[in-house]
Image (cartoon, rainbow, N blue to C red):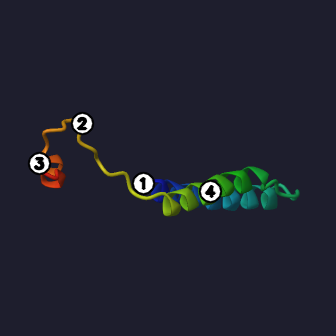
Amino acid sequence: MLLGAGALLLVAAAAAAIAEGYAADAQARGGNIIPALVIAGLGIASAIVGLVLPPASPRSADPSDEAHERNSPL
């Protein structure tokens, strides 16, 4: 899920950078891409965390679960 969120943030950063580039070109000024770089940095960090963290596995709170009985030494 974090990997998908990171990819979505990277797409949003690219769209923001493109929009800022067009606006800066139309106004004949230098562009400010720092906000797009911040969004891209968050996206890359989120994607890396999503790749590194193992998927969460559901745990049973009930000790009488089948898995608990199967792993029991008795």
Q: x%, y% of residue 12?
A: 58, 55
Q: Nearer the viewer, mark 3 or mark 4?
A: 3
Give, as a three-letter code, the residue at label 2: Ala
Residue at image mark 3: 66
Q: Nearer the viewer, residue 20 or 44?
A: 44
Disc 3, SS:
helix
Residue at image mark 4: 45
Give, as a three-letter code, the residue at label 4: Ala
Give, as a three-letter code, the residue at label 1: Met
- Whichever of labels 1 and 3 marks the residue nearer the N terminus, that label is 1
- CB of mark 1 within 8 Å of CB of mark 2? no
Q: For residue 15, say whether it is visible.
A: no
Residue at image mark 2: 61
User: In the figure, is residue 4 to the left or right of 37?
Assistant: left
- CB of mark 3 within 8 Å of CB of mark 2? no
Residue at image mark 1: 1
